[in-house]
Image (cartoon, grey):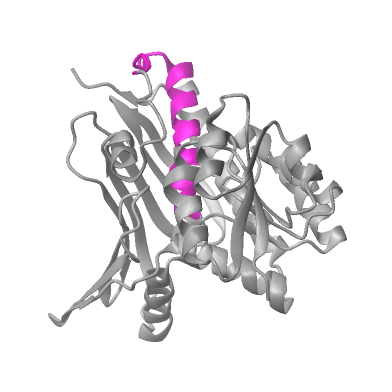
Amino acid sequence: MMPHGVGVIGAGPGVAALHLPTIARLADRFRVVHVSDAGSGRAATLAARADARASSGTAELLADPAVEVVAICSPPGDHAAQILASVAAGKRAILCEKPLATTVADAEKVIEACRRAGIPLVVGTNHYYDPAWGRARHHLTVSGGPVVSISVTLALPPNSRYHDVVTEAFEPSPARPRADLADPVVAAGVVRALLTGLAIHDLPLVRDLAPRFERIVFARALAPVGYAVGFVASGIPVQLTTVMLPDGADALWRLTVTTDRDRLDVDFPPAFVHAGSASVRVRTIDGRDTAYAREHDDGYVAEWRALAELVEFGEPVEYEELLDDVRYALRLADEAAAVVSTAGLVEVSA
């Protein structure tokens, strides 16, 4: 079987560091044939690595008969329109980076279009596809202990620390002015953007364990850039905490699930680095401490393999699950932002 031709919409660091190396690792199933940018000129540099075509905009890529599969790696606001355009162009399958859409209405349109056309769709929630999450979920299922709390903790240095390791394609991005978190409207915008841009990596995992969103308990913006959000879902308290420090230590990205019998930690590797799967550690109330080794494949490879199986073997697409993930994430983001903007729950360090 010939590998499926992939057209990549977007030419940012995530494409250079994540998707192009991942597709190269699956050369028996996929090959990049076209890369497009939004006018930056970066597509030509990335396409040259894969001996692929380059263009600007989406029209030329979607008209390219060599493109069977479209990878949408553009800014989130463009995702829904580009999925619909890919469907209209008759492409065979789509992998879209998270989030699927920035509004529930757009997500519903996208899902209906893909369902009607029978087009396989995978959303790039690499943590959900990480083999370690499957191991963790299996433990939680067979251990029998009910989940009593969930937390996701992120301490992140600038992404450029990892960009520099994995790609030389880009000039360093200029420093952005620091947001004025004392302004509730600004703080609310920061919290919403971070929840839909960072927390969304793990919200499908949270929803897997606590599917019924109930209410926000607290929401704050954290300086210099971050958030602390607490909510209740399916009767389970969930806490999300993120802080991004300019000179911080290497990334900590941890999902912790506590049951009435044990504590389970899933530690994900830094974004932009292919370092194998997350690690899983379980500590029980009787003193046992079990650490599982990382697997060779990471979630990026797993999500592309999942797409291959949908294309090649006709596996059913869980369209409603994808739509419910969007509803869950956007409701959380909107309600947390509303709390920050109206109640002024903002923490600003000196």
Residue 198, x across and y down, in percent: 43, 42
Q: Nearer the viewer, residue 272 or 267?
A: 272
The magenta segment is 175-203
Query: Quarter of the image holding residue 180?
Result: top left
Q: Nearer the viewer, residue 130 or 214?
A: 130
Q: Is residue 104 above or below residue 311?
A: above
Q: Nearer the viewer, residue 341 or 325?
A: 325
| Magenta stretch prevailing secondary structure | helix
Left or right: 175 as drawn, with respect to 190: left
The residue lying at 49 percent from left, 67 percent from top is: 302
The residue lying at 67 percent from left, 64 percent from top is: 4
User: Within the magenta stretch, is there residue 342?
Assistant: no
The residue lying at 62 percent from left, 49 percent from top is: 326
Left or right: 76 as drawn, with respect to 59: left
User: Within the magenta stretch, is there residue 183?
Assistant: yes
Query: Quarter of the image holding residue 69?
Result: bottom right
Residue 117, x across and y down, in percent: 86, 59
- Quarter occupied by the N terminus: bottom right
- Quarter occupied by the C terminus: top left
Q: Is residue 75 above or below residue 6?
A: above
Asked if one can make out residue 289 in the rendered structure from this viewpoint, the answer is yes
Residue 336, x across and y down, in percent: 49, 35
